[in-house]
Amino acid sequence: MKKILAVIGALVVVIIVALLVIPSLIDWNSYKSEVTTAVNEATGRNLELRGDLSLSLLPFPALSVEDAVLGNVDGATDENMVTVKEVQVSVALMPLLTGNIQVTEVRLIDPVVSIETFADGSNNLVFDPKDAEGHGPQAGTINNPEDQPVAPSGTSQDAPAADNGESSLASSVRVDSLSIENATIIYRAPGTEERIEGLTLSVEADSLNGPATGEGYVFYRGIPMTFKLNLGEISQSKPFPVSVRLGIDEVDGGIDVGGQIDLSGAAPDFNGEINGKFDDLRKAAQRIAGDDADIPDIAAKEFDLSGKLAANAKAVTVNDLAVRFGETRGSGALSVATEPKMKADLALRFNQLDLDAIMALASASGGHKDVATGAAGEKPAADTAANVPDAVKPNGQSIPSQGRKNDVASASTAPLIPADLTGSIDLEVESLIYNQTPIHNARINAGIANSKITLNEVSAGLPGGTDLQVFGSISGAKPQVSADLRYEIASENIRAVMRWLGVDVEGVRADRLRRFSLTGGLKGTPDQININNVDMRLDDTAVRGAIVANLDSEGLPALGIGLKLDKINLDQYIGASSPASSVAKPAAADGASGGTAAGASGADVASTDKTASAGSG
């Protein structure tokens, strides 16, 4: 009996030694060509395994691949779509003996992924096996239907059978841990480049089809962001749940998106909700802008956001949108579509909006400094930017450099507003706080189409019982903007408006600067402004006429002025500055003319006498 046990023990030792030693004796690199050929036939892309392949069987089967590169499509900016410094895969041994696959760990170290959208709307995310190079003895041949092998009786060649097999395999593979370390994702589109660096992700999945959970962090433009992912079991025939939470490191709160994904149609659809909450918006803004940013205390309020979200590859819609910031309440809807043309619609209503606080937040410009731009926004030379070391967080994590490049081609001839862009905006604020004073019922209603912004209504109730209205159009069909606007202002107390704007009116008599009205038109480009059909009334004074300003010359603008002023008593508007000024002055005569073309009234200045023009430069 002892001899039998000794023999069995010896055999076990021999088997273990063989499992440990034999894999190290095999040149696994000789199998590179077979692996790269299989990937090429499946994706149409070239795979290069530039490093070593290694395989071990004990204590568990493990595969390691170094320096793997997946090629890109023709015409892409980067030669390679994916590069990975190292891939490590470990599989549990015992489940393999029962026919199950339990992947205990998958590690992707330093992957770089380049995603690109081209001018024609296509991208490099489509993998077409038809693009694969021919391999094997039958490469480049065409098989006629009669040459195809006949399937054995009782078998089926229908696609659903294959799909069922793939689904069964995906469901039987369990992934205990998928980790991505220090990934870089680059997205390019015509004229734009975005980079996300330092991405770290950890995922656990019951199978390749889910359910799965994951979490990680990433630095985007220097902002440390965290995220969590929950994914239900993926199905091609019915919706399945998914939720994502985005947060800012060391800040209470975040943005949650959750709902159902439907893959049964021609394109994926998502229907769900978006909810966001930050206990202290000032802390969130401070974390985003940087520790040196001066965020005002007025931002230290709770912020909430909610809405119903629907999205697919062509459109995103948010309905029942609700926003709360302190005492501010807002509601509305947002829709953005990319096909058949770019279209964006926004409707928002607020009970009140503190513009002073918004401007204060916007002026806090101490934000995270991009390594590529350096301090004070000064860009170093391109060949030295890469040598600038990354900023280092207190816990030792490096914050990689971020940046965005905008290289717009043919900017001198392209229209300022794309002709295929359409949209609308309807924004209304019951009480808009500016200069610590409320503006009542402020509204902007505008539409965009055919390279033109049409202002259907821009109106507001200013201090002093003042009503303001502007309407007309702004054209961007050419590289330079042009405007054709009409304006109307009516005030019972223009003095209050001037005080609100910071104008000192204390030296003017108390019964002056009261009633005011102004109507007229404005046509203009960056080179010329034409203020026409001016009709202004101030107290007892009326002014009519037009003004032209040519701005395309150096120095002071060349002006053409044609105004008719019926009467004005300057003594009533100029405060007394000395005893001599108290001496009685002759009253101004009615019908006194102002300007250089007294006969002009309500017409473009172009029709006035040429002597009305004066200029310099």
Image (cartoon, rainbow, N blue to C red):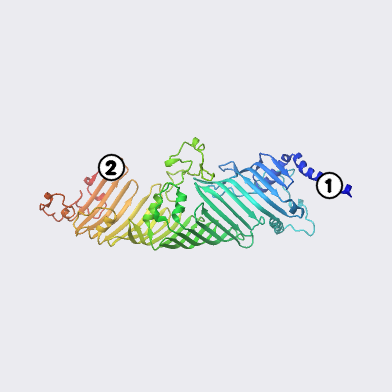
Which residue was labeled with disc 2? 556
Q: Could you tell me if the residues under marks 2 and 1 are in contact, i.e. CB atoms within 8 Å?
A: no
Q: What residue did someone put label 1 on? A: 9
Drawn side of residue 476 relative to residue 69, left or right:
left
Indicate which disc residue 285 carries.
Answer: none
Q: Residues within 10 Å of mark 2 (few under 14, many from 20)?
A: few
In this rendering, position of residue 426 left or right of residue 268: left
Q: Is residue 509 visible?
A: yes
* Mark in the foreground, 2 or 1: 1
Sooner in the amino-acid sequence: mark 2 or mark 1 = 1
In the foreground, 131 or 21: 21
Q: Is residue 69 above or below residue 295?
A: above
The amino acid sitting under disc 1 is Gly
Label 2: element kind: loop
* In front of the other: 295 or 521: 295
Local SS, label 1: helix
x then y, percent, for residue 243: 57, 59
Residue at 35 percent of width and 52 percent of height: 483
Tell me where residue 358 appears, x and y as whole percent: 39, 54
Left of 268 or right of it: where is 494? Answer: left
Give the number of marks.
2
**Is residue 476 among what the camera can see?**
no
Q: How far from the left and from the top, in percent, is residue 456?
A: 37, 60
Observer-nearest of 429 and 182 = 182
Separation (CA) of disc 2 from disc 1: 102 Å
Return the x and y of residue 462 as percentages of the image width and height.
31, 60
Q: Quadrant of the C terminus?
A: top left
- What residue type is disc 2 on? Leu
Q: Residue furthest toward the front?
A: 2
10 Å crowding of disc 1: few (<14), some (14-19), many (20+): few
